[in-house]
Image (cartoon, grey):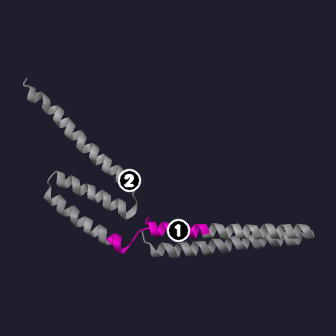
Amino acid sequence: MNQSFKAIPVIVATLVLALTTSSSFAAINCMSLTGCERAICEKEQELNEAQAYNDISKVLGIQNSLVHLRTGCANAPDRSSAKYNGKLAELKKEYQDDLVDAFDDYQDDIKEAQREGKAAKLQQAEQKYDQKVQTVTAEYHEKLANLNALYPN
């Protein structure tokens, strides 16, 4: 058999490996992204693959999809955006701080009731704490709903 024919399977295998490796590497890069950023990254990968195969109709279709995707993402940022995540983190921190404050007040009320030796005041402290937790939780859920309304899926 001719030496050049023996080299063909090696060359083909090398090309296949190179194409799949670069495609896999690019996919890994997109995996670290979320929301619109990830969708755009993945669509750009599809575009690169279609261009590599010189598939003009597929290239045009993917470019059209990218335009719509970018427009949609610009008009309606999703809940995975950095701005949403920052506001959500602030909201959760505020909620936790409110719960800690309510618990601290509860502990103070219990200590006072114990000092005074009043069992009824202990029960009042528990009821006051339960009500505060319910109020804070309801406010948190209301603020969360408002935040989610600003950032649609």
Residue under label 2? 31
In the picture provided, is 101 more to the left or to the right than 50? right
Residue 22 on image: x %, y %: 27, 46
Q: What is the secondary structure assignment of the residue under circle 1?
A: helix
Q: Amino acid at mark 1?
A: Leu
In the picture provided, is 63 more to the left or to the right than 32? left
Q: Quadrant of residue 96?
A: bottom right
Examine the residues drawn in magenta and state their main secondary structure. Answer: helix
Residue 116 on image: x %, y %: 92, 70
Compared with 25, 57 (above or below) is below
In the picture provided, is 84 more to the left or to the right than 140? left
- Residue at point 78% right, 69% down? 106
Q: Earlier in the sequence, mark 1 or mark 2?
A: 2
Q: CA distance from mark 1 to mark 2?
A: 22 Å
Residue 99 on image: x %, y %: 68, 68
Q: Quadrant of residue 47?
A: bottom left
Q: Residues within 10 Å of mark 2 (few under 14, many from 20)?
A: few
Q: Quadrant of residue 82?
A: bottom left
- The residue closer to the viewer here, 137 or 41, is 41
* Residue 61 belongs to the span the image colors magenta: no
Compared with 10, 110 (above or below) is below
Q: Amino acid at mark 2?
A: Met
Q: What is the secondary structure assignment of the residue under circle 2?
A: helix
- The residue closer to the viewer here, 66 or 14, is 14
Of all residues, the one furthest to the top in this rendering is 1
- Give the magenta range: 72-93
Residue 134 on image: x %, y %: 68, 72
Residue under label 1? 88
- The quarter in which the C terminus is drawn is bottom left
